[in-house]
């Protein structure tokens, strides 16, 4: 397995990706909870926190806002993405090339695949090209691996999540980002199935501090590398406080309770 470049995406083998591609994936309503977050700079500021190992954004946001943050933030170029307005079978077109992402200063690339979609074959082929091109540029690859489509609707059964993380290994991702299966045991299976591919949990919609940190603690206990999170950080009025707690749970392996009590 290709070595995950620690400086690019991880610290001490652990990962905390701050994702902000929601303007494309979900639309601007995601920013209503904290209206200042409609301005991407607000989220880039949050990403300067020591706990954040990379920030995931789409091309337009990277082009416009990343130059001011390139000294303080690692860029994870989210290469593909689709809007919520699209009602077809799950599919995510590529919006920028690996070459162009590297030119802008990307430290890593991210790519969504929807195993189980009728359009899975196309997505696998497109992922192949992006993954091989990322290898040429020495950029680690994060796969957003979401089994979705036809009969599968956001399925978080243990075997589906373990299958999703395994697909990350099979197709050559350095990190597989999967939905939380709901238990530490489910996550252990996903971690084991992925072999040397690191597994991170996808944040999901906002929940209270303890519930959120408890799931992150379970991921770390299960051998997961960490988290890729958006709303559970920047939909909070004080993102720094939750990032402080995440730093304790992910990098210092503290319990959710201890991390919140300080
Ligand atoms: P959240 O932590 O806010 O769920 O963000 C993680 C993420 O993968 C984003 O990169 C992406 O925009 C979003 O989730 C997509 O989630 P879904 O396809 O389930 O709506």
Image: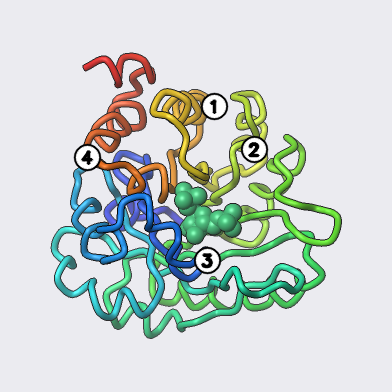
Model colouring: rainbow
Q: Under tag 1, what secondary structure?
A: loop
Closer to the camera, 73 or 242?
242
Q: CA distance from mark 2 to mark 4?
A: 30 Å
**Label located before the other in sequence (2 or 4):** 2
**From this viewpoint, is residue 128 visible?**
no
**Label located before the other in sequence (1 or 3):** 3
Tell me the crowding category of disc 3: few under 14, some 14 to 19, or many 20 or more residues within 10 angstroms, Cα based: some
Closer to the camera, 20 or 134?
20
Closer to the camera, 136 or 173?
173
Taking the image as shown, residue 92 lies to the left or right of residue 51, namely right
Per the image, the residue denoted by label 3 is 25
- The residue at 73%/57% (across/down) is 148
Taking the image as shown, residue 23 lies to the left or right of residue 12, namely right
**Label located before the other in sequence (4 or 1):** 1
Q: How many marks?
A: 4
Q: Are marks 4 and 1 in contact (CB under 8 Å)?
A: no
Q: Are marks 1 and 2 in contact (CB under 8 Å)?
A: yes
Q: CA distance from mark 3 to mark 4?
A: 24 Å
From the image, which quarter does the C terminus lie in?
top left
Look at the picture and state if 137 lies above or below 262. below
**Which of the numbered marks, if any, corresponds to residue 240?**
4
Q: Are marks 3 and 4 in contact (CB under 8 Å)?
A: no
Q: CA distance from mark 3 to mark 2?
A: 25 Å
């Amino acid at each position: 397995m290709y070595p995950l470049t620690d400086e690019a995406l991880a610290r001490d083998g652990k990962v905390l990706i701050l994702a902000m591609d929601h303007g494309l994936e979900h639309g601007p309503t995601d920013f209503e909870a904290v209206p200042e977050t409609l301005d991407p700079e607000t989220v880039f500021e949050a990403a300067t926190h020591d706990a954040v190992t990379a920030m995931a954004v789409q091309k337009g946001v990277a082009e416009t806002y990343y130059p001011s943050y390139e000294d303080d933030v690692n860029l994870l170029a989210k290469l593909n993405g689709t809007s919520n307005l699209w009602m077809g079978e799950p599919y995510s077109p590529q919006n920028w090339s690996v070459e162009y992402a590297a030119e802008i200063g990307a430290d890593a690339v991210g790519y969504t695949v929807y195993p189980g979609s009728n359009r899975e074959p196309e997505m696998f082929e497109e992922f192949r090209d992006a993954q091989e091109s990322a290898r040429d540029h020495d950029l680690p690859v994060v796969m957003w691996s979401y089994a979705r489509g036809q009969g599968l609707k956001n399925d978080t059964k243990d075997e589906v999540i373990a299958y999703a993380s395994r697909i990350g290994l099979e197709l050559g991702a350095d990190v597989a980002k999967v939905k939380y299966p709901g238990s530490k045991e489910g996550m252990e299976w996903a971690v084991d199935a992925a072999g040397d591919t690191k597994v991170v949990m996808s944040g999901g919609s906002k929940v209270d501090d303890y519930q959120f940190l408890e799931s992150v603690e379970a991921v770390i206990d299960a051998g997961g590398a960490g988290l890729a999170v958006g709303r559970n950080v920047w939909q909070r009025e004080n993102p720094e406080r939750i990032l402080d707690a995440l730093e304790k749970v992910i990098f210092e392996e503290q319990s959710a309770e201890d991390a919140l009590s300080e």
